[in-house]
Amino acid sequence: MNSHMQLSLSRRDDLESLAYCLIYLWAGKLPWYKSDNKSYNNETIFKFKIEFSSYEYDNIYIPNNLMKFLDYAIKLKFEELPNYKYLKDLIKEL
């Protein structure tokens, strides 16, 4: 989300992107991803991401661990070193 606000990016943003990739792999889709090669503008994608906080997405249950991963990534401070062990454990428990 920081890239949509044109902020400097860090590890937190990489982890947020990874979280969305994992959710996509689990659910098979994301609200802002369209497979027809037409894309939403950045503002629309940003709004989708802000509203994306539900464990139930388009009738697909998203595991608690994936949402915890995403929430953890979003809440990291710019210079904060992530707890990679915690994140790996969340994924292993899937």
Image (cartoon, helix red, strand yellow):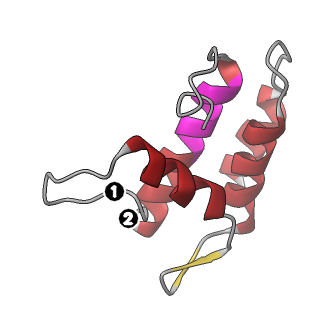
> Split into 4 quadrants, where in the image is the N terminus?
top right
- Would residue 52 be visible to someone looking at this image? no
Amino acid under disc 2: Lys
In the image, residue 15 lies in the stretch drawn in magenta: yes
Q: Position of residue 54 (x, y in %)?
A: 68, 72
Camera-nearest label, 1 or 2: 1
Q: Which element carries disc 2, helix, strand or loop? A: loop
Q: Position of residue 90 (x, y in %)?
A: 75, 49
Front-lying residue, 5 or 70: 5
| Label annotation for residue 33 | 1
> Split into 4 quadrants, where in the image is the C terminus?
bottom right
Q: CA distance from mark 1 to mark 2?
A: 7 Å
Amino acid under disc 1: Tyr
- Residue on which the image places disc 2: 29
| Label annotation for residue 43 | none
Q: Answer left or right for 66 relative to 24.
A: right
Q: Answer left or right for 92 relative to 49.
A: right
Q: Which element carries disc 1, helix, strand or loop? A: loop
Q: Which residue is most to the left?
A: 36
Q: Position of residue 59 (x, y in %)?
A: 50, 87
Q: Main secondary structure of the magenta part?
A: helix
Front-lying residue, 82 or 30: 30
Q: Position of residue 48 (x, y in %)?
A: 52, 59
Highlighted magenta segment, given as a residue range = 12-19
Question: What residue appears at the point 64 percent right and 55 percent down from the top-left corner?
Answer: 50
Please say if 67 is above or below 42.
Answer: below
Question: What residue appears at the point 38 percent right and 64 percent down from the top-left corner?
Answer: 29
Please say if 74 is above or below 67.
Answer: above
CB within 8 Å, label 1 to label 2: yes
